[in-house]
Image (tube, rainbow, N blue to C red):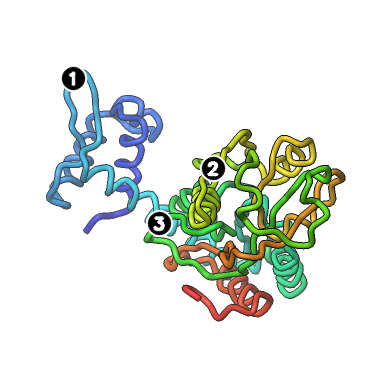
């Protein structure tokens, strides 16, 4: 039976890739550490580390085991903390991630407000992160839940839809089409586009490209910005046009107008991502509030 001590020893060696440094980190001697790792490999029946006098490196099996070991250790720590909180009456806590655009729509602030009103003893910590950063933090246990833009490509995470919203065209107020009430997507085919870099928001970027390609053109990206709010500033400055979530119009800025799209039915999703094996009791309380406030039935909706 593999115990948590073996996992902690392995994680230390895998992170340092050096038995001497890992031993110092664990406050044990190096020979016993080497023996424990060999014992772990024997118990599992696979080689986790390749080592020689020059270096230590993870095998493919070791890399997979490292990810799972980190999750197991994190879950064990959460279980201990939950038991301690239950015994002492101390407040529970929940670590929440969110993409910056989550705060533009009324639904997310409403969820946080209702949760705080109903569960004042739960301590909330909010972290602004990209969807990809949240996925990693959820897997390693440093987040309980995250508000993300799907898809995020992690099969070990569960998604619960929070909202769908349409795209709008963001135009400089000086644009020739600024006085129109609604636009066809093809009417901006020749305009330069301001967009998020693909590596920061894969789903939003690919969705915009797909919308344009369906209409028969590929957008000419003249400028990139790392935040949607920065995109509005660049559009207002006349550097191009952009397709943005409808909620972004709640960010007041002069020099920019937002127009409905006549021929685009695509919508952008916001979802709550979490691990099903996450033991924090506060997580289920928050999921209940999300379902009630958003009106969506639950995971996979």
In whole angstroms, how far apart are the C-alphas of marks 2 and 1? 40 Å
179 relative position to 88: left or right: right
Q: Label 3: how many residues lie within 10 Å, few (<14), some (14-19) or many (20+)?
A: few
Give residue 171's position: percent from left, percent from top.
75, 47
In the figure, 8 relative to 283: above or below? Answer: above
Which residue carries the number 3 mark? 154
Q: CA distance from mark 2 to mark 3?
A: 16 Å
Q: Position of residue 290 (x, y in %)?
A: 63, 73
| Separation of marks 3 and 1 at Cα, in angstroms | 36 Å
Query: Secondary structure under badge 3?
Result: loop
Q: Of marks 2 and 3, which one's residue comes earlier in the chain? A: 3
Report the residue marked by disc 2.
Answer: 200
Q: Earlier in the sequence, mark 3 or mark 1?
A: 1
Residue 276, given in percent of the width and then of the height, sits at 44, 68
In the figure, 222 relative to 245: above or below?
Answer: above
Q: Which residue is mark 1?
A: 53
For image coordinates 24% across by 28% down, the residue present is 56
Please tell me whether mark 3 or mark 1 is closer to you in this view. 3
- The reply to whether residue 125 is in sight is no
Depth order, front residue of 83/235 = 235
Give the residue displayed 19% in from the left and 37% down from the top: 35
Dot 2: what SS?
Answer: loop
Judge whether residue 212 can be spotted in this image: yes
Q: Nearer the viewer, residue 172 or 106?
A: 172
Q: Secondary structure at mark 1?
A: loop
Q: Quadrant of the N terminus?
A: bottom left
Residue 190 appears at what percent x and percent y?
Answer: 62, 42
Query: Horizontally, is 79 left or right of 14 in the view?
Result: right
Mark 2: give few (<14), some (14-19) or many (20+) Cα within 10 Å.
some
Of tags 2 and 3, the one toward the viewer is: 2
**103 relative to 30 in the view: left or right:** right
């Amino acid at each position: 039976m593999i115990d948590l001590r073996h996992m902690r020893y392995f994680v230390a060696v895998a992170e340092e890739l050096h038995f001497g440094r890992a031993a110092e980190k664990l406050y044990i001697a190096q020979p016993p550490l080497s023996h424990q790792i060999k014992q772990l490999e024997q118990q599992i029946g696979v080689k986790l580390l390749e080592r020689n006098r020059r270096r230590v490196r993870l095998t493919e099996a070791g890399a997979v085991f490292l990810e799972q070991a980190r999750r197991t250790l994190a879950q064990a720590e959460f279980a201990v903390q939950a038991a301690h909180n239950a015994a002492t009456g101390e407040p529970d806590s929940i670590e929440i991630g969110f993409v910056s655009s989550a705060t533009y729509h009324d639904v997310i602030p409403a969820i946080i407000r209702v949760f705080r009103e109903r569960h004042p003893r739960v301590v909330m910590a909010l972290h602004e992160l990209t969807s990809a950063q949240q996925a990693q933090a959820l897997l390693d246990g440093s987040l309980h839940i995250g508000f993300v833009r799907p898809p995020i490509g992690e099969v070990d995470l569960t998604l619960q839809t929070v909202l769908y919203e349409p795209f709008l065209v963001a135009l400089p107020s000086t644009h020739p089409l600024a006085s129109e009430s609604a636009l066809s997507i093809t009417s901006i085919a020749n305009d330069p586009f301001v967009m998020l870099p693909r590596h920061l928001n894969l789903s939003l970027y690919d969705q915009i490209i797909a919308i344009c390609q369906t209409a028969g053109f590929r957008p000419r990206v003249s400028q990139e910005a790392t935040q949607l709010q920065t995109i509005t500033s660049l559009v207002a400055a006349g550097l191009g046009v952009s397709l943005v979530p409808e909620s972004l119009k709640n960010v007041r800025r002069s020099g920019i107008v937002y127009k409905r799209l006549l021929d685009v039915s695509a919508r952008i999703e916001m979802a709550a991502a979490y691990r099903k094996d996450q033991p924090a009791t506060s997580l289920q309380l928050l999921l209940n509030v999300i379902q009630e406030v958003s009106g969506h039935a639950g995971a996979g909706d």
